[in-house]
Image (cartoon, grey):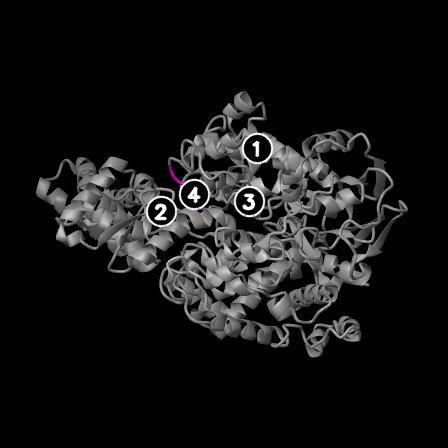
Amino acid sequence: MIKECSKAILDSIRESSKSGLLLPEKEIFSKFTQKLVKSHEQIRDDAIKAMLDEVISSNEDITVLYDSIYCRYYYSALTMTEAYARLLLLKKENSLHLMASIIRENSAKYPRPIPITVFQNFPFELRQDDILLCINKMIELQEYEDIEQVTTSIGNLFFYSKRYLDFDYAMMLAEWEDVGCIENP
Amino acid sequence: MAKHGGWAGKVLRVDLSTGKISTENTIEKYKDFIGGTGIGYKVIWDEVPSATKPFSPENKIIFGTGPLAGTGAPCNGKTAITTLWPTCWPKPLVASGHMGGHFAAELKYAGYDAIIIEGKSEHPVWLSIEDARVELNDARRLWGLGIRRTTYEINLQMGHEASVAAIGQAGENLVPMSVIINSVSHSAGGGAVMGSKNLKAIGVRGTGSVYISGKKEEWEKAIKFHLSLLGANNQHVVPSSPQPWAEYYSPGSRWISSKGRNWEASRPPIETGSCDPHNLNRIAYRSNNAVFFLGNDAWKYTVRGNGCTGCPIRCHTILRVPSVYSKYAIPEIGQNTCGGLNFGRAFFKTFPDGPKSQTSIEACMVGMHFADDLGIWNNYGLLQRDFQKLYYDGILKTKIDEKEYKSYSWDKFEKGDPGFLFELLPRIARKDGELATALGMGTGYMLERWGISEEDWKKDPALQYWKMGHPRHHSNEDSGQIGVIINTQYNRDAQCHSHTNFIRNGLPIEVQKRLASELWGSPDAVDATLAYTPMNIYKAKMAKWSLLRKELHDALALCNWMGPISASPLKERGYRGDDSIESLLYTLATGDKKSCQELDHVAERILLLHRAITIRDMGTKEMRTMHDTIPDWVFEDIKDKSPFSKGTNRMDKEDMRIAMDMYYEEMGWDKKTGAPTLETYRKFDLGDVAEKLKQKGLLP
């Protein structure tokens, strides 16, 4: 029974990742406690925890992430990257924090400002009004004071972090991506 | 002689003046130049005398494929069309265009690596090639028809499997800005050269195959390996939005597929999905160039992607836009990519509903309908930029008479009404009126005709005019000095994508620098976009590599719009591509074992021959000052930002002087003149070429 359950937990995590989802620990508990219904609740929880530990230690691809209140989420690195898993975790939490993280990461790593459409499209799928609301809130909060915006010559909004890009650089990069790349195919 | 794979083995020669049709042995005569532009340049050097005019019967037009055309090698659909280029100003010089589609494969299956067309027919003819049966046919009934109808008529006769490369009315009327098109939308310039020879079309149907020398299992393994390294169009190796499998993404990537993004005009609609790079059966779903250029609205009109032989990328998006049938009475289906897709849209500064709007999509449909049927070339968008400048700067009014000026609906043009294209484009193809005639001549000749200084065009950054009648093509905007060097080298726009495909691949700058270090010897070979650093030798090496791989691809019949494979989407490979994929495929296909360096050596010979023809036909060795020129706007910035500061493309004149020095040194060319030295010609077995140049005083 234990072995079957462990295998089922492993499969669930891998299936979730394959579908582009993190598997929250609470979902694992809820699903698998029913399979161990005859046992005492404490024993069931302990058994599932033990099975999860076993799944993690025996399968290199299974990884755990913690959210801000230390809830655990699982994914399989076979079909999901850490970068994407972290992005999903951010998406579950604070939209402001999500947007700021994405904007800062893009400004630092590539470097580039990113268009508003990134947040409108999969996997963020935020409405334009909500994005603008977030940005307006950011302006009021000190922890987001580095987040800035530029508008390209064809009217599209791009965001950047001034920790990594100055205005001129961000403006030219946005213009290049929005207009230049299209005119120079 | 040992049997070679890859090559069909014969080059077809058709003399339109005499009607004589003959063949010659590819291996004996052209193997040292591989194929494609290599054969083209060899023919022009050997057989077309200096001072020949593009529309003279003495000019030749060469349709060259290569040893990988018609094989299973990915992206093998290119036919290089080489001739004296009629828009090259002030003097036509050798150049080539690169036509995708299925013509190259059919030609190989028919048993030919290339076609050399020479002379001039007394009356319009079309050439039919059905394996060994090659005939000239009367084309008087086809003369005056558009490319679509011509193709249809020839396919009725030869069967639907035949590939037809035809010219439209623009080519017939000797409009220099004209193209040859096969397979609906795959074009290359040179339409008017065909027209000048009274050659309306070439229909080709082959029932043979291409022999592969290597073992079947090794060949199949190589193909799968190559496929595994492919990204999306332009070898962008990361998706445009975060995907579960992806570590990186780039909103500027052409890898657009995603969950929830559908080809909505398919019946039933097809979801493109996440497209994990390990799933080789999903490569064709990654790119959608209509969406890339026109925005998300284009999903609803997307039927699917289309493309060339052996290419899973399918960069020509097929669109079904019902409104254009009711509004303009044109077919609701259209297909193309990049410049062809944007042909109509690019004429307009604005549209009533925005730049990526329903009207802009309709302008694309109208533009494709005309350009790909009349056979008009856009000179990499310069036609449209010229037109806007002429109109908005008030130049047009001064160059054409009032009656003609009033015959155009300028209110429609200003409003962004695609109906305006019905007035302009057919007139260009017919040379109807002063404006249409001038536009059809190409920029250089138009400026000369109207007494406008080329310097005025060189000063305006919005025009992106480079030199000799042509615009920039991935210059400083893509990779600083590397792009500038590349853009100095050709007699038309550079058409080199080796560098831009790397720079725009979507990987973070740190990863790009790591790959650059492996490929060109130092991370300093590449800079972050718009954050350029002073010239260094590694940039010169990257520039040379970029040019050689372009020439190699053009000779092998591979698509330089999809290569080289300098990066891949595979995290487990550290995003490395494979720099030797061309030599792996070439060796297996032909049985002629050549390393990556040995193939680059052949590519350098081809580039060198192009240089030699240019020097011979320009009649000067002063290439540095007379040919490899850089327009003023490269050294300017709209905000007067200094070179090498972040946020500018501005180059520094002294730094570019050093850059050209380094490039010439890498190439073994004389730094003072920019002309190759005797030793360099000899190193590439072109001693006879050097001797002829020496006799004319054209060696440094």
User: Would you say the magenta stretch is mainly helix, strand or loop?
Assistant: loop
Mark 4 — residue? B256
Badges 3 and 4, same chain = yes
Taking the image as shown, residue A102 lies to the left or right of residue B685, namely left
Type of amino acid at the residue the image marks with label 3: Ile
Q: Nearer the viewer, mark 2 or mark 3?
A: 3
Residue at position x 22%, y 37% in the image: A130
Q: Earlier in the sequence, mark 1 or mark 4?
A: 4
Mark 2 — residue? A152
Mark 3 — residue? B395
Chain part drawn in magenta: B255-259
Q: Residues within 10 Å of mark 4 (few under 14, many from 20)?
A: many
- State how far apart marks 3 and 4 are (Cα): 41 Å
- State how far apart marks 1 and 4 are (Cα): 30 Å
Q: Residues within 10 Å of mark 3 (few under 14, many from 20)?
A: some
* For the residues bearing labels 2 and 3, Cβ distance under 8 angstroms: no
- State how far apart marks 2 and 3 are (Cα): 28 Å
At mark 4, the secondary structure is loop
